Amino acid sequence: MSETDIRGTVAVVTGGSRGIGHAIAAAFADAGIVVAIVGRNGEAAERAAAELPGAGHAGYACDVADPAQVDATVKAVEASAGPIGILVNNAGITRDNILLRMKDEEFDEVIAANLKGAFNFTRAVTRGMMKRRDGVILNITSVVGLMGNAGQANYAASKAGLVGLTKSVAKELAGRGVRCNAIAPGFIETDMTAALDEGQVESLRESIPLGALGRPEDVAAAALFLVGPGARYITGQVLAVDGGMVM
Ligand code: NAP
């Protein structure tokens, strides 16, 4: 990646087949970045990649929670598109429940996908980035990781964990030319929030100073900035894109 231009850089966007990840993939493709979309559903990832503007994009079936699948996917992306210069750890799930009813599997699945998945991909791309002294990692956390949320102990813990991961990776790799930041979206209109009923959405709106839920494109615009040359002096930061919920 050049100091002034990210065109032609190869980016992996986990969970890029829909929602926030897909908006990030589309913003990257518009900027001339070559995007590898990763999701458990390989066909959905391939379809999403085929819709992006420009050439060279591809979809990969991979469960981010499985280190062997992640290592194989990184090898496959690099063999077909070239060295990975940008990693966006966006894949995430919820398994909400009140604490007393939360099952072990509900806790473990969320930590495995949201936190261990980001660790798996970060470790897999880091060796190459360090060798080239060039790379950017962006983790998609959540305001819930900063504030907590009743009924989401597992999800909030995974997202708070991502903040610690971001800062540790930023400190460890800064001297090797690799930056690592996070975005903490507030409530964004995607499949993940589609399950909320009108009453819940209304009370959410009241808690958002800018008075509305966000759109995936709002997060994508911040992501494009943070991976680009304009952010060359920014690392270890968590940028809230949340209509002012956390300030
Ligand atoms: P979404 O619409 O549910 O999409 C989730 C994406 O992640 C899908 O592409 C899904 O593809 C992929 N994915 C899930 N588990 C995976 C796994 N184990 N391995 C590989 N891919 C996996 O979610 P979203 O709302 O866009 O959220 C994206 C990220 O933003 C998540 O990390 C979420 O926690 C965070 N976030 C969302 C909001 C919000 O309000 N929507 C707010 C704050 C933070 P497959 O199903 O094919 O695997």
Image: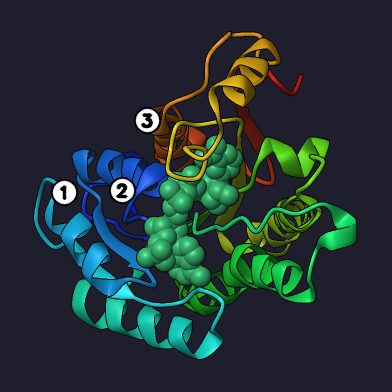
Marks 2/1: CA–CA distance: 8 Å
Which residue is drawn at the image coordinates 13% and 63% (left, top)?
A: 56
Which residue is drawn at the image coordinates 20% and 66% (left, top)?
A: 46
| Residue 230 x/y as whole percent | 45, 32
Q: Amino acid at mark 3?
A: Glu
Which residue is drawn at the image coordinates 56% and 34% (left, top)?
A: 196
Viewer-nearest residue: 102 or 239: 102
In the structure shown, which secondary structural element does the residue marked by tag 2 occupy?
helix
Marks 3/1: CA–CA distance: 14 Å
Q: Which residue is mark 3?
A: 217
Marked residue nearer the N-terminal end (3 or 2)? 2
Which residue is drawn at the image coordinates 17% and 60% (left, top)?
A: 47
Are the two marked residues, 2 and 1, in contact with CB atoms closer than 8 angstroms?
yes
Q: Could you classify mark 2 by the number of other residues whose Cα lies within 10 Å: few (under 14), some (14-19), or many (20 or more)?
A: many
Q: Quadrant of the C terminus?
A: top right
Up-down relation of residue 197 to residue 139 (above or below) = above
Q: Which residue is mark 1?
A: 52
Viewer-nearest residue: 43 or 37: 43
Q: Amino acid at mark 1?
A: Leu
Q: Could you classify mark 1 by the number of other residues whose Cα lies within 10 Å: few (under 14), some (14-19), or many (20 or more)?
A: many
Marked residue nearer the N-terminal end (3 or 1)? 1
Residue 232 seen:
no
Q: Amino acid at mark 2?
A: Ala
Are the two marked residues, 3 and 2, in contact with CB atoms closer than 8 angstroms?
no
Note whether ligand 1 is within 8 Å of mark 2: no
Residue 27 seen:
yes
Task: Report the side of 148 relative to 234 (left or right).
Answer: right
In the structure shown, which secondary structural element does the residue marked by tag 3 occupy?
helix
